[in-house]
Image: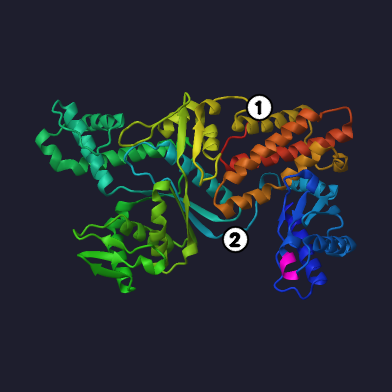
Amino acid sequence: MRDLKAVIGQALDVSLSKLFPDLSPQPQSNIEIPNDKTHGDLASNLALKACKPLKKSPLEIANQIKNYLTENSKQLGIADYIGKIEVQSPGFINFFCTNKILSETIHEILDKKDNFGKSDIGKSKKVQIEFVSANPTGPLSVAHARQAAVGDSLANIMSFLGFKVVREFYINDEGNQIRILGLSIASRYKELLGQPESFPADGYKGSYIYDLAKQMIESSKPKKIEDIDSNLAEFSEFGASTILKIIKKELEDFKVKFDIWTPQSALTKKGEVTKIVEFLRKKGFIYDKDGAVWFRSTEFGDDKDRVLVKSDGTFTYLTPDIAYHQDKFRRGFDWVINIWGPDHHGYIGRIKAAVQALGRKKEDLSVIIVQLATLFKDGAPVPMSTRAGQYVTLQEVLDEIGPDVSRFFFLMRRVDSHLDFDLSLAKKQSPENPVYYIQYAHARISSIIKKSGKVDFKKADLNLLKEPEELDLVKILAQFPEELEACVKMLDPFNLVSYLQQLAAVFHKFYDTHKVISEDEKLMLARLDLVEATRLVLANGLRLLNVSVPEKM
């Protein structure tokens, strides 16, 4: 269907230029799949776009284009694929496909198998996707889990479409939050040694802080109470490194693997943070004011200039982030994609400005803001706060429902929409659960194929597929490559999630209406080709989301 769109688009462009040679500039044809099946398989609004410059009725233009396409269908290369063209008010041109394009779709899927939908639109462009990058101050929350599902699935899709993708986790192992972690552990350490004191007001209150303090006591000789405060760095380092191990294990259980783990401290030790200030100063993007060092970020569209070095000589959060982005581009990435939570929305302008100051185009950096997810348990939302310690961890979700359902549910809304994660629905093994519904469609087809004993496909007469449910199934199969490309265009795997739900629904409707294995052998062979093509596309889509593909359930 994607290639047919290109063929029709070219035919529309030719028809418009032939009919109205003086029209300049010529509007581009826009071809979509209509929501209403009675409006055809594909539809164009070209006449509506051309009516204003031509000063003609869109219906009149549409009918002229329709007549030209019909009379010149062979020369334009659409005769074999378009059986009928209709004009609909106020000026849409609707196209109805022949069975030929549908048969070719099934044959292409059966030929390419696991590679159906694969393309080279990425042209080996080097892409770095940095995501999760949670502070190592506590186990991963549901909010981090959603970012992990988005980043990993998007990386899979982009790799499938020809991009050279590297997944990266930036470890914020320096700064105030790590200091507070050390203070929190030290306070619990003292408490466990029988000399409690007031807990830090902004400390991390989760029970895991007690666990870390116990581990420190068990792993080394207990320190004297009076020596603890002078060794806070040791508490911070132990806590951050131990929590990072927990985070890595949680992500592994979530089926997310990173290619690179970059600690902020490594950049600091190499002097990259100090160097970036001097680099920007030499380029004229730095000035001094009120004892602080400022970045002229307004020159690149930011709403105000930003402090890089405070009057006390310490760096702001922005400074190491600029050094990190310099490091990314020095490693040869053509396109850098950051996946952040909504609390970082106000940070986009300044980091975009920094990238331009580094000599890159603004478009070389994309920032995806993933909205929060609210976990509902027993009908009530669960509060999430790392410092209060009252939140459900990713590991707890995985223990309850497993990685497949978890990953899929975290992707069931567009990244810019808040997500309500219903645990009770996720645990159901019924058609109400979208993951079960899709996996069951694949398992059902696997069972049909096994029962039929068929191993040799592509020899059936696909012209026998004429029922509406059969044709609907082929048409949605043809949309798979286009849906993958839409995921990259929108930087959101949601399109694939929604597509798989629709495909499963169309398949189940077909299966509930028609028998696949029957006494009509020719029809049975054609339907077996159809369902095998469906199985292949379902499997390809689930694998890109890193959701398992069961053959029986």
Q: Residue 160's spot in the image, x, y percent?
A: 60, 50
Q: Main secondary structure of the magenta part?
A: helix
Residue 358 seen anywhere in this rendered image of the structure: no
Q: Secondary structure at mark 2?
A: loop
- Front-lying residue, 80 or 117: 80
Vertically, is 377 above or below 505?
Answer: above
Residue 53, magenta (yes or no): yes
- Front-lying residue, 286 or 282: 286
Question: Which residue is found at the position 40% from the left and 37% from the top?
Answer: 141
Q: In the image, which residues are magenta? A: 50-54
- Looking at the picture, which amino acid does disc 1 mark? Lys
Question: Which residue is found at the position 82% from the left and 50% from the top?
Answer: 97
Vertically, is 370 above or below 206?
Answer: below
Calculate the distance from the C-alpha at mark 2 to the C-alpha at mark 1: 37 Å
Label 1, residues with CA under 10 Å away: few <14, some 14-19, many ≥20: few
- Looking at the picture, which amino acid does disc 2 mark? Lys
The circle on residue 552 is 1
Q: Residue furthest bottom?
A: 22
The circle on residue 519 is none
Question: Which residue is found at the position 72% from the left and 39% from the top?
Answer: 534
